[in-house]
Amino acid sequence: MEIESILSPVKKHLALFDQKLKQNLASDSYLISQVARHLVNRQGKRLRPAMVFLSYGLCADSKTPIHPDHPVMNVALAVEFIHTATLLHDDVVDQSKVRRGQVSVNYKWSNLVSVLMGDFLLAKALRLLVETDSPAILSTVSGATVNLSIGEMSEVQESHNLDVDEKTYFQIISDKTASLFTASCEAGAVAAGANRKTQESLREYGQNLGMAFQITDDLLDWEGETEKTGKGLGTDMKEGKITLPLIHTLKKSDPLTKKKIIRLLENDFNPKDFDKILFFMKGNGGVEYAKNKADGFGKKASYCISGFKDSKYKKALENLVSFVIQRDK
């Protein structure tokens, strides 16, 4: 199922979101305006804002309209700004030239511009959260931002570490990816006035969905199609990111095979070695193991919302799980 179809219950919300996004990126600064226009043109799937709206809809009266200045709109904008800011900073760290199929901000302008634009977006996110006048929302999203930063730092710390274990990997992706998924769902419930138990159910849904999302993302680095993913295969490995398929392969390989894989990896990752490593990975179950883990987290996410009454929002959140696991970009 296409993402547009899945998100149809919040189609109007996302259209309004796009209008507000452009308004919030407007600036007297010519450079900020130019970079903002570039960012808007490379529009992504808007998953995190969509999760805010879907979680809100699941908990609130579906007949209650969301006006432009509704607190939930501020939440959706804030999580998207935080997410985009991290991508801008990531591109500087990774020296990326492409993001979502188009030239990255750091490559088109400079590392300095990319970092400062990220800072601008984080500042805008903070202001939007304060304007919700909800300490609970501010605490939820700001806490996720802290965890996201910790996850990014931990990933750098474990870069090129071929001894990194599964527990450490899961903690990193929980912090750097799942935290913002978690906050999006929980904050949507908070904005709807849901009780603590309901908030917790959606928080757990977001956590498990985020874990499934990142594992699938890591798998696409090995098996994805460059035309769809917008980046070349093996990019994570070139950057020293050790992900679940490789972690499991190294763990399960016999000593001789493990030695061969490590020798290939320590050879500054020659692109010619990619197929050899993937061959070992498939032979030792690394790819299949990661797929099963992503599926397991997906099932946990679905279970977290199984107790909610049937609605178009619940159905969308269920379908979102399948999309995240089966996506090809």
Image (tube, rainbow, N blue to C red):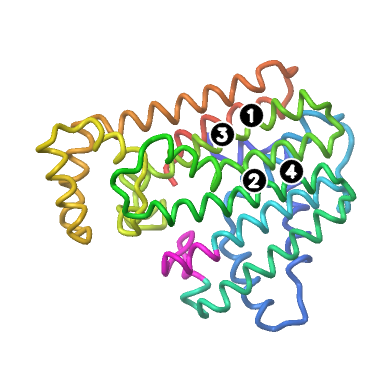
Q: Position of residue 185 (x, y in %)?
A: 70, 37
Mark 1 neighbour density, 10 Å: few (under 14) some (14–19) many (20 or more): many
Mark 2 neighbour density, 10 Å: few (under 14) some (14–19) many (20 or more): many
> Which amino acid does the dot numbered 3 rest on?
Leu
Q: Earlier in the sequence, mark 3 or mark 2?
A: 2
The residue carrying mark 4 is: 140
Q: Earlier in the sequence, mark 1 or mark 4?
A: 4
CB under 8 Å between discs 1 and 4: no
Residue closest to the eye, 18 or 220: 220
When the figure is inspected, residue 130 is found, relative to residue 179, above or below; the finding is below
- In this view, the mark in front (2 or 4): 4
Q: Which mark is residue 70?
A: none
Question: Image point 75% across, 53% down: which residue?
Answer: 17
* SS of the residue under disc 2: helix
Q: Earlier in the sequence, mark 2 or mark 4?
A: 2
> Which amino acid does the dot numbered 4 rest on?
Thr
CB under 8 Å between discs 4 and 3: no
Residue 193's quadrant in the figure?
top right
Q: Inspect this view and state whether residue 21 appears.
A: yes
- In this view, the mark in front (4 or 3): 4
Q: Which mark is residue 48?
A: 2
Q: Earlier in the sequence, mark 2 or mark 1?
A: 2
Q: Distance from label 2 to label 4 (Cα)?
A: 14 Å
* SS of the residue under disc 1: helix
The residue carrying mark 3 is: 209
Q: Earlier in the sequence, mark 4 or mark 3?
A: 4
- In the image, which residues are magenta? 88-104
